[in-house]
Image: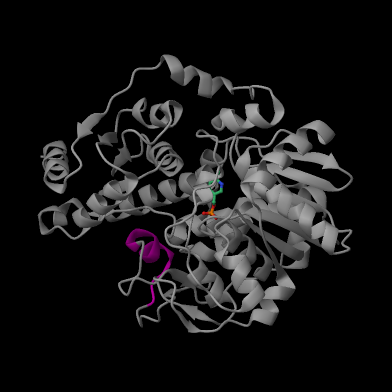
Amino acid sequence: MKKIMYSSTNGHPELLDFKGALLRGQAPDKGLYVPEEIPRISKEELASFSEMAYPEIALSVMRPYLGDLVPEDDLVAILKDAYDFPVPLEKVYDEKYVMRLDRGPTFSFKDFAARLMGRLMQYFLKQEGRSMVILTATSGDTGSAVAHAFYDLDNIEVVVLFPEKEVTGRQRKQMTTLGKNVHVMAVDGKFDDCQAMVKQAFVDPDFAELNLSSANSINVGRLIPQSIYYFYAWSRTAAPDREIVFSVPCGNFGNVMAGLIAMRMGLPVRRFVIATNENDEFPKFMETGDYRPIRPSVKCISNAMNVGHPSNLARVFWLYEGSMDENGNVKRNPDIEAMRREIYAVCVTDAETRKTISDAYNRYDTLLEPHGAVGWAGLARYLKEVEDWSPCVSLETADPAKFPEEVVRAVGLEPPVPEAMARLDDMDERFDLVAGDYQSFKSQLTKLFS
Ligand SMILES: *Cc1c(COP(=O)(O)O)cnc(C)c1O
């Protein structure tokens, strides 16, 4: 099988295979890894997806990226183990659907990417006889998705830092009730302090032999697995001969980037709606051709999307023949006309988000939380402006029970709490308290691994 190689969006000459890029994370020149070539899935193979279960579709999508790095039997087992939860496509009206990506162990769509990345990392580390320490700072959801994804895997230890006073009780419990190879530190500080300590640890020569890795959202191993559910959605709503419209609530743009890759692989997509909250640097760029990051980012109720400069924009630009460095400087303009043909970008305010949660529930009995509501509002805007009769799928990225205040406020009803989430309330927690300075963190980390 032909081997796809991965290169940096900043142009570093070294090419790596999937395993190399996965274990490296970020390229040495701070660029993001992208596949040198995007594999195509034939029409015949696409047509067969409607008969396949999720892990089988996943096999068809992932196989060309991995080449022969993972033998097929092993890959089948990994995919079955990673994707053992439902992916409902809920019909809202006519051919308009909400895809619920919130049924994984942490009730976040981030489970899809993190679970496969964790399993592939474990697979390759075992092969190499190596071990790794995943060090990650979280403002809430990423940490729990990563902690769960790596929980109980061999050859991998996980250390999660979170700002003690800035996460909800349930978000905290999703991390602190795991134990085993998951170590959690509550930092007396803000998210930015956690992030700074993690960054410093990565360049600290005293930790060189720990083999620290960030497993963060820019890892190519987290990007590609997100393409799978776009194929799945199409196979359940539009296959075999129709184009589909996706609406994606966007923060760091990893989710929609994976969708754009799916389209380049041959998935029949009419249009992507990119819906942001009031951090509207991308919709503004699409309108004016001028890119200006928003610093600091605006605090909106869809808080996982409060991103003033999406890291994956560098990949989106690359896809459209442009170039952007890690700080958001545009080195070469992308083909913006091509982008406008394929992407419809909208900004959704908090007021509109709240109204959308209320309308979706009152008109269609569809319960959304703020992130999914941004997506649904974006789709409504698109349909108002563009006459399009394609099946439409809007992505719901978290369970409404994670945002009870906003749901109660909009619809006057407590969102039902999934059993696994409710169970957390009675479970024992374990975590260390750490002062907000690097030395305190360093001594904790040293103690942990000595
Ligand atoms: C992370 C996240 C997003 C944003 O996804 P990106 O891939 O960063 O664009 C949207 N919704 C929820 C609930 C998230 O946790």
Q: Which residue is drawn at the image coordinates 71% and 33% (left, top)?
A: 367
Is residue 53 depicted above or below 384 in this figure?
A: above
x, y percent for residue 211: 22, 54
Identity of the residue furthest to the top in this view: 426
Side of 367 where 91 appears, left or right: right
Q: Is residue 70 visible?
A: no
Identity of the residue furthest to the bottom in this view: 332
Identity of the residue furthest to the front in this view: 351
x, y percent for residue 25: 36, 61
Side of 57 where 25 appears, left or right: left
Is residue 209 depicted above or below 7 in this figure?
A: above
Q: Which residue is drawn at the image coordinates 48% and 56% (left, top)?
A: 307
Residue 205 location, quadrant: bottom left
Residue 19 is one of the magenta-drawn residues: yes
Q: Give the quadrant of the C terminus.
A: top left
Q: Which residue is drawn at the image coordinates 36% and 80% (left, top)?
A: 12
| Coloring applied to the structure | one colour
Residue 317 location, quadrant: bottom right
Residue 389 is one of the magenta-drawn residues: no
x, y percent for residue 351: 66, 45
User: Which sits in the foreground, 185 or 282?
Assistant: 282
Is residue 344 depicted above or below 333 in this figure?
A: above
Side of 286 where 193 appears, left or right: left
x, y percent for residue 224: 53, 59
Segment tinted magenta in the rendering:
15-24
Q: Kindly report the secondary structure that dominates the magenta region of the rendered protein.
A: helix
Q: Is residue 75 visible?
A: yes
